[in-house]
Image (cartoon, rainbow, N blue to C red):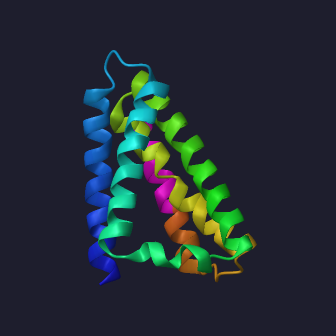
């Protein structure tokens, strides 16, 4: 089931880029990011209440709070940079560079989460990096 959600995530991420590139024309990139964020926050809380997940709030540990907040800050920084890049660059070049996050995630997962970094992972990282380079040149 994870694969279905991962594919849907990729499709929605692609739509996000195209819709954002069209919508950001003539709009300050920070303002556009703020508008997008309000919509995302609204959708997320709607899902929390529709699935009755709000009851889990008191059970969240201090450590989880800290890392979820840090993750949120990283997401915000990513979105601000992404929207600015999308505003001044071509979507067909910005998006592949943004997807280098896959390579960076694999490296960080190896370093900090001690996840396995295999020959297959290394080859994948090299191919993604090379593919990105080819696409943006």
Highlighted range, magenta: 127-137
Q: Residue furthest top?
A: 26
Figure quadrant of the N terminus: bottom left
Figure quadrant of the C terminus: top left
Q: How many marks?
A: 0
Quadrant in the picture for residue 88: top left
Query: Where is residue 8 shown, x and y percent of the image?
Result: 26, 65
Image point (45%, 34%), residue name: 34
In front of the other: 107 or 5:
5
Query: Where is residue 94 shown, x and y percent of the image?
Result: 43, 37
**Residue 101 in the figure: left or right of residue 12:** right
Q: Is residue 26 magenta?
A: no
Residue 8 in view of the camera: yes
Query: Where is residue 111 shown, x and y percent of the image?
Result: 74, 71
Quadrant in the picture for residue 27: top left
Relative to residue 90, is residue 25 depicted above or below?
A: above
Residue 137 in view of the camera: no
**Residue 109 in the figure: left or right of residue 25:** right
**Residue 78 in the figure: left or right of residue 43:** right
Image point (29%, 49%), residue name: 14
Quadrant in the picture for residue 68: bottom right
Magenta highlight: main SS: helix
Image point (58%, 71%), residue name: 122
Image point (33%, 60%), residue name: 46
In front of the other: 40 or 114:
40
């Amino acid at each position: 089931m994870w694969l279905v959600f991962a594919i849907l995530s990729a499709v929605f991420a692609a739509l996000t880029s195209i819709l954002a590139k069209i919508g950001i024309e003539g709009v300050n990139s920070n303002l556009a990011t703020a508008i997008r964020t309000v919509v995302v926050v609204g959708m997320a809380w709607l899902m929390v209440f529709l699935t009755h997940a709000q009851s889990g709030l008191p059970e969240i540990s201090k450590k989880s709070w800290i890392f979820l907040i840090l993750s949120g800050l990283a997401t915000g920084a990513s979105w601000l940079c992404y929207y600015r890049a999308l505003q001044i660059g071509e979507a067909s070049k910005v998006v592949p560079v943004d997807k280098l996050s896959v390579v960076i995630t694999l490296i960080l997962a190896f370093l900090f989460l001690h996840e396995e970094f295999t020959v297959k992972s290394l080859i994948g990282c090299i191919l993604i990096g090379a593919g990105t380079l080819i696409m943006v040149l």
